[in-house]
Image (spheres, coloured by chain):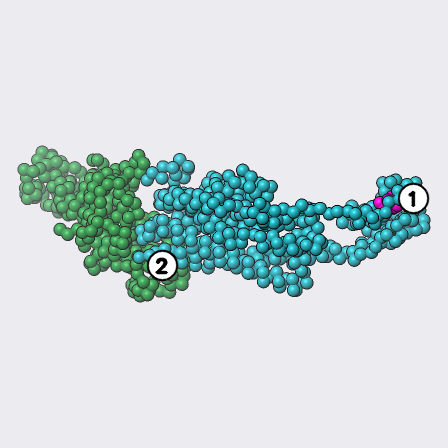
Chain colours: A cyan, B green
Amino acid sequence: MNHLPLIIKREYLNKVRNKSFIIMTFLSPLIFVGIFALVGYLSSVNNDNVRNISVYDESGMFINSFEDTETVKYKILTSGTLDEAKKVTENDKSYGLLHIPKTENLVQLANATTFYSEESPAISVMNKMERTIETKVNNARLKQANIDAEKIKELRVDLEIKQESFAGERTSEVGSIAKLIFGGAAGYLLFMFIIIYGNMIMRSVIEEKTSRIVEVIISSVKPIKLLLGKIIGTSLAGVTQFVAWVILIGVLSSVVALVFGIDPGAMQGQQQEMLLQSQGVESGSPDFMLQVMDAYNSLPLVNLIVMFLLFFIGGYLLYASLYAAIGAAVDSETDTQQFMMPILMPLILAVYVGFFTVIENPHGTVSQVFSYIPFTSPVVMLMRIPFGVPVWQQILSVVILFVTFIGIVWFAAKIYRVGILMYGKKASYKEIAKWLKY
Amino acid sequence: MEYLLQANNVSKSFGEFKALNNVTIQVPKGSVFGLLGPNGAGKTTLIRIINQITMPDTGNVILDGEPLRPDHIQNIGYLPEERGLYKSMKVGEQCVYLAQLKGLTANEARKRLMYWFERLEIGDWWNKKIQELSKGQAQKIQFIVTVMHNPKLLIFDEPFSGFDPINANLIKDEILKLRDDGATVIFSTHRMESVEEMCDHIALIHKSNKILDGKLLDIKKAYQSNTFEVGLLTDNKEAVSAALKEKFEITPTTFKSINDELQYKVKIPQTHSANDLVSFLTSYGQLNHFVEVIPSANDIFIETVQKN
């Protein structure tokens, strides 16, 4: 007689029908998309404001240099004193006054230029004005020294060192970033999944204990079956919720984009540009898209998917059984604190190692060591794989993970078997160590 | 005698603590077997071993002539002392699930539930959640879940806790009916009056050891002390008391009476019979009250436990 499907079915239905589960399934994407829409809306409102800037140019050099844009309009003042200009600007309720004094030479001019405003100005506006003046002054100085500015531009070389592995795989900085996003997303996904659904398993075990049904159940089924059924049932509910989230977020964001006319791609593009600029890559360059495609094509996709599944299942089950053991050891959720730390530490460590060490050096000693330790390997190895990890290393890590998993399940099942029938005893580590011998 | 369940020389330790020490019990087929003992004596451990929740360190358990196997759980119905149900699950769904775990098909479970719901006057609870029921109502559901797969062996640990007297009586009758229909019942309780009412065999476990077992009647006979409660209507109480004291062992006692009698518990020595006492007493006055003192399960329990 096979109880396992029955238990899995009950656990699954119980989770999926739960009111708060349903609410969370629908509410989370709503909140997520809502926040994005709000941020998008607010930043577009923010930029809609037209800023009027008065330019009081005593030098007369910049009369035609400032070009109006959609958000910034310039007004050139030529007559009067600085004080008058300030007064006019203030009465106009303009954004601010840019004062360019008349000076002996260009260096002094560059240093004496001042922007007056009521509040501190936006960085983007300041940058724009600085750039304009800088270009003009630089060109003028080159001219004074009899150097052709056009010639310099012509002679300049933009350099980007091409990267290639000994095996002949081409990569680029863009490619590295793409790999990072892939690996990071996979590792982080696993991390979130473990925390959300591990807790759910723990609560479900505690619920069975506090409602005192557990002895009724285990007079019909073996505790290990109940444990496995619970883990599998809850995980399936978790996968269901995750899939629902992905679909809902996709649908909702398209709806939001249509209704509000916000282009989610544009927002993503902005972020990407910021990331790329910090890496010194210009997205405007024609071969940018090519590089992204290249990086995508050079990702070991089959390898990544297979390993993602293996590490995901192994890592999740490993932690899930620990969560279940904790649930069995305590009487209520408030008692779980002392046991949560040892579980969360390696997980958080794995994410930190992943995001700092692996990015810096995917194949360094620290990255390698942590991709073998079974409590961190799922996250760290998933982040390393896009950078190309030898197959034997991957297999070794998976084997270590699954061997540990079997050990942990045995250990968790022991604690579980004894713990679910212990009431009122405050479980300490010492007490639990004793249970292992029963 | 044919035994449905035999536990032979069962021992179980938890770390340093020995929960059961070489305990042997034999439960006759068709009996109501009282498993008695003070708190922490090891009763629950023994019951859990029978249910295969825990494994014995040494010794074995035979159910209906066969050593205990995993699939035997279908033949056992167990109502634990620490019991409960999934609070947020609907009554019908929950009962069907628990019955399926005991090997019934969903359809069969539904059919039997209908029978039991009618029998225990449970109307339209099918779609109610357990948390919407009262404690007594939930206990009824718990009872049904325990018995609905028609097990050969029923184990009840404090079955009446949580029931009002009316429902306790209803459940008691149901247990006895199940016994009459062929089930064997192991019954663990601290309520000695229900032991008195229901059990025909008992075993007493104290400090991990079995210290007494057998037919309740036989045990009572063994604990019989040849003592009688007497009430004698006489004018000369002092003289009678003195004469009684000379021949018998007497202790003062009181029982309800409409007359002002001389009331004593009298123990008759081996050399005399009850008739001797009667003729002795009638020679002094009118004998209104003459009852043999039968040891109650309660007396036996206290006496045996204190002796050990």
Q: Is label 2 in a helix, a strand or a loop?
A: helix
Q: Amino acid at mark 1?
A: Lys
Which of the chains bears the disc numbered 1? A
Q: Which residue is rendered at x = 61% and y = 57% of the image?
A: A33
State left or right for residue B281 relative to residue A416. left
Label 2 and label 1 in one chain:
no
State left or right for residue B122 relative to residue B173. right
The local crowd at label 1, few if under 14, some if 14 to 19, many if 20 or more residues have their Cα within 10 Å, is some
Which of the chains bears the disc numbered 2? B
The image's mark for residue A92 is none
Residue B228, given in percent of the width and then of the height, sits at: 13, 43
Residue A245, given in percent of the width and then of the height, sits at: 54, 58
Q: Is label 1 in a helix, a strand or a loop?
A: loop
Quarter of the image where one finds residue A423: top left
Q: Which residue is rendered at x = 69% and y = 49% of the image?
A: A281
Judge whether residue B24 can be spotted in this image: yes
- Read off the magenta span: A137-143
Of B232 and A114, which appears nearest the observer?
A114
Residue A142 located within the stretch drawn in magenta? yes
Q: Which residue is mark 1?
A: A102
The residue mark sitting in front, 2 or 1, is 1
Q: Which residue is rendered at x = 88% and y = 48% of the image?
A: A86
Residue A181 located within the stretch drawn in magenta? no
Vertical relation: B26 (above or below) B118: above
Q: Quadrant of the C terminus of chain B?
A: top left
Quarter of the image where one finds residue B11: top left
Q: Are marks 2 and 1 in contact (CB under 8 Å)?
A: no
Of A45 and A168, which appears nearest the observer?
A168
